[in-house]
Amino acid sequence: MNLARFKRRRYTPHATPIEPMPHLSAALGGAQLMIKRDDLLGLTGGGNKTRKLEFLVADALAQGADTLITVGAVQSNHCRLTLSAAVREGLKCQLVLEQRVPGSYDPAASGNNFLFDLLGVEKIEVVDLGADMAGAMAAMQADLAAQGRRGYIIPGGGSNPLGSLGYVACAEELLAQAFDEGIGIDRIVVASGSAGTHAGLIAGLIGNSAGIPVTGINVRRPRPEQEGNVHKLAIEVAALAGVAAPIPRDAIVCRDEWVGPGYSLPTPEMIEAVRMFAATEGVLLDPVYTGKAAAGLIGLVRSGEIARDERVLFLHTGGSPVIYASQSILGVARAA
Ligand SMILES: *Cc1c(COP(=O)(O)O)cnc(C)c1O
């Protein structure tokens, strides 16, 4: 594997830290928990989409694009970071926002929605769940073409094979860190959404014969569907990256016990996890992705499925700006 073959913009000038979480481990009575701080990646507010955009935006620039077009939920971290990359590169950005929960788009909302405005989004189109998202983006691209401009379409979550290379690179980064810093890793736990993060990690770990299993925690889809999506994409990104080893189906594990009633909808386990990470380690999660992934981590430790002496790396994929639009969900009135 030689990722230097690919054009890449650089948005984070260093590896993200791997930190121990001793207080959380103590509070749970076991497992040696660590966290890789991809919430500290570059671009506005950090998070996993920054790694994908390094490859996607390099491609957009190579194709002469002047505008990035992408799609996401109404509080999408991916849309915030795509817009931020556009600002960094002197490009424009147009967004299609999908109301996955009916009536959830609030133009006055805080969090990422406020940042869309602050970062100078050129156009937002809001559509309902089930609308033709690809068609909406193609129409934006056609409108731009009619004005003599060139739009580059980035799929939801940046999760095509090219974007997923960002997490092949992350696998290589964390293996090098583990070697340099003498860190043993028995398992990685990560949120699994549009699948590029999970798939890229799998391809990178298998491509390096790392022997580290990954437990994905779903945020939206049932287990069989999500495992199929991740497996398909992992095979594609492995082929693009030049991984010779096959990607076995049983390397893909996507647990769906912590999704709750649906995408972005709160669960008691998510609220507990967000509050626990903050109060024990000072780490902010988000209610949609990392809060549910952390609820899965906590659940697996408590049930004993993660052994007491297991060394587990939780990959923090970001999302903390959403916390500022979620106080009514997460807040608990304090006793006077
Ligand atoms: C997009 C996102 C994820 C999920 O990553 P995918 O590559 O879409 O599976 C996880 N956490 C946060 C904070 C995200 O924004």
Image (cartoon, rainbow, N blue to C red):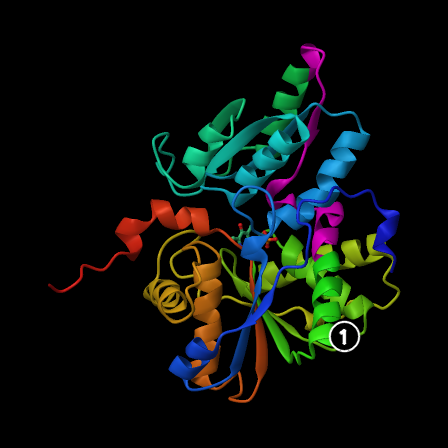
Residue 215's x, y, as percent? 59, 71
- In this view, the residue in front, 87 or 202, is 87
Residue 60's x, y, as percent? 75, 32
Residue 158's x, y, as percent? 65, 44
Label 1 Cα neighbours within 10 Å, binned few <14 / some 14-19 / many ≥20: some
Determine the image quadrant of residue 82.
top right
In the rendered image, is residue 257 in sight? no
- Using residue 77 as the reference point, say whether residue 159 is left or right of it: right
Q: Residue at x 53, y 38 (%)?
A: 80
Compared with 107, 320 (above or below) is: below
Compared with 248, 186 (above or below) is: below
Q: Examine the structure image and report whether residue 151 is included in the region drawn in magenta.
A: yes
Q: Examine the structure image and report whether residue 37 is included in the region drawn in magenta.
A: no
Query: Which quadrant does the N terminus fall into?
Result: bottom right
Disc 1 residue type (three-letter):
Ala
Determine the image quadrant of residue 285.
bottom left
Q: Which residues are magenta?
A: 145-167
Which residue position holds label 1? 210
